[in-house]
Amino acid sequence: MRLKMMLAYALLLVSAPVFAQGKLNVMATIEDLASIAREVGGDRIAIESIAKGYQDPHFVEAKPSFILKLQKADLLIAIGRELEIGWLPPLIQQSRNGKIQPGAEAYLDASAQARILDIPQGQITRAMGDVHPLGNPHYWLDPENGKTVAREIAGKLTQLRPNDKAYFDQRLADFVNRVSEGEKRWLAMMAPYKGVKVVTYHRSFPNFADRFGLDVIGYVEPRPGIPPSPGHTLDLIQEMKRQQIKIILMEPYFDQKTPDSIASQTGAQVLVMPPSVGGEKTITDYFKLFDYDINLLVNALKRIGAKPAGND
Amino acid sequence: MRALHYVHASMIAAVLVGAPSAAPAQTPDAQALRNEPSNAQALRDEIDQLRRDFDAVRQQYGDRLTALETRLSAIQDGAPPAAAAVPAQPAVGQRPTAEVPAGAAGVGGPTGALPVYGAAVAGSKVFNPDMAVIGDFLGAAGQNKAARQNNVSPNPALEMHESEASFQAVVDPYARADFFISFGEEGVNLEEGFVTFTSLPGGLLTKVGKMRAAFGKVNGLHNHLLPWTDRPLVINNLVGGEDGIDDAGISVARLIPNPWMFLEATGQVFRGDSGADPNGNPLFKTTQRGELSYVGHLRAYQDLTDNANIDLGFSYSRGHNGASNGNLVDPGSLVTQLYGIDATYRWKPLQRSIYQSFVGRTEWIWSRRDQLTSVQSGSGMYLSGDYQFGRRWFAGARYDRANRADVASMLDTGQSLVLTYWPSEFSQVRGQYRRTAYAIGPADNELLFQFQFAIGAHGAHPF
């Protein structure tokens, strides 16, 4: 027992905590939030994301190393809408950090003001798969929601660091401007293909589809969170042939086997489209996410000579 | 004069608002006016002053009203998730009503709208805890002669082994509470029920209530989180069987800051009772108030890469074992001490995390049990590996080896092969082939199978 105590004290001594001088220590659950927070917070914050952009944000492991990071956090930004329900609650509980408990001052649910789609109406059951009762949590894939989230983050940062209000406000305005400019460009690129029909793997892209004029007619998953089944795959192939669907969008963390086999039978192309910053090495921020995804999509649409819906 | 003005202003305000009690004109001020009818100028000044005061009051109330409205709309804007979650809520203050049924309009019958009881409190359901029920159905087939010879009660052919209901919610800004109630074949048992203080100073994570002790890894796991259908022999023989060290007490855990790894020290004090081994000998048993049991645990965790990590634990426990069995030789001196080491290696490639993973785990436990005539020093271990080879498929193997706590010279060994299938995140089918060579008699070969299914709130994924 004595030895253990001595060891503990020795450890305490060696570990003079290295405080980032004056910087607000911000943790985000996914890299998209981290990117937006970085834009708004600039050099006044130190930010890190728990999930990597190339991993499935529904299934992040609640590793104790994250507990250490949350323990030191001055602010935690979460996507909300139960995206992180499988792993964030135990991390927060064990963080010993009263500030970042849900409902406390330094816990920010970024979805509060965002435009949320797929909010289930009426009775929902798990027979529908792993439905999110509070709506689809992949809302950051609409640049308008990106601006909203940035405003939320700026508000929260200002609340925590009132002295830096002007700095955050200026950076927010700059970010919003650049997103608006980008959005114009992205919309212009997608405009010729408005209403083009696609199939996606998981329901990760409703906000993206809604903003950029894609018509998602089906999913590789029979139900959210349920892996592909032969019966559903056959139905989907029939439907894709009937409607001449040539594009399958999938997230980088799913298995490509089923989409590939569907593609080979329908002549469609499988596009691995990262839904998050960090989903590809080149996607280092929120702008590059849309640049990459829109370019990927437009190039594919050009290759297959797609025409807008109604013209076929 | 100021005070008087205030009285005037408030009187006028009261009259305007229509408070009937302020209506009678016979007030001291009115009398004063009648006593000095000649001083018209003064009267006029007075009235002007009153008007100004009234305007000021009106202005003041108007401002406050505007401020309140702004705050109200801000609150409404700030809480759309709640609004979205319960779209059918009637507006606050508007109680839902029902019409009086046609036949009820007789003599003395109610008229107008009737209140609907219960509907108005729907909003309070928001505060209901997260509830879930997990069913655990076990079946067994094959030979179990040796189990009987060794006084181990064999698994029944079919058994609704356990139905665990969980209730979990935040208590207040400082604490949360978790209740796990298991309904087994023998009855209802509070498996765990504790409050966790999440934000105590000094980084202390404190739990108070009944809980599974932090001795090693398996003791802390509920049945449905085990990677097998059963618990390893070493747990059954040396750490109180299926119930394990699960007792009323207080737990304090603190992170030990250091630049290298996650290091957490946990200290727990319990009343001193626990589950029993298959022969019915409890690990810990109290006969009087002072016979507390203690558990200490040190956990070290380190990420090796983004995809792999290692988790080490050192445990110690001490408690009174009740071996004196009412024989008052010196009951206080008969204690059991347990020492444990556990190691877990996890591998999960981040980008393919839902398809592939591997967990290797082992626990080594040493027991030193004082008995009336001897001291029994036994030990045991298990080594297990689980490989996920598809989104829904897991295969695993386990090796078991354990002495008996009360007769350390007896050794049981076992081997298991496990195959698990996950239809979804909320259900699981598992088969386990188990060969057990108990200390006495021939080896048992059994096929165990299990169905698990969860309804209700989405719980956290185990780690």
Image: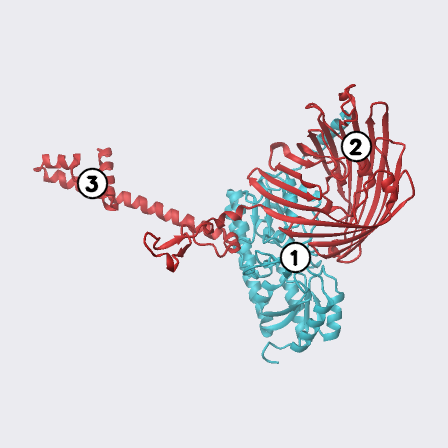
Q: Secondary structure at mark 1?
A: loop
Indicate the chain coloured cyan by its letter: A
| Residue at mark 2 | B281
Out of B353 and A129, give the one closest to the viewer. Answer: A129
Check the picture and name the quadrant holding the C terminus of chain A. bottom right
Circle 2 or circle 1, nearest the eye: 2
Which percent across, then down, holds residue A104? 55, 42
Q: According to the colouring, which chain is red?
A: B
Image coordinates for residue B146, horizontal then vertical, percent: 88, 42
Residue B104's image quarter?
bottom left
Q: Earlier in the sequence, mark 3 or mark 2?
A: 3
Residue B322 in percent (x, y) is at 76, 27
Question: What kind of residue is marked 2?
Answer: Asn
Extreme-right residue of the structure? B442
Chain under label 1? A
Q: Which mark is residue A277?
A: 1
Q: Residues within 10 Å of mark 1 (few under 14, many from 20)?
A: many
Q: Is residue A38 visible?
A: yes
SS for dot 2: loop
Q: Amino acid at mark 1?
A: Val
What is the secondary structure assignment of the residue under circle 3? helix
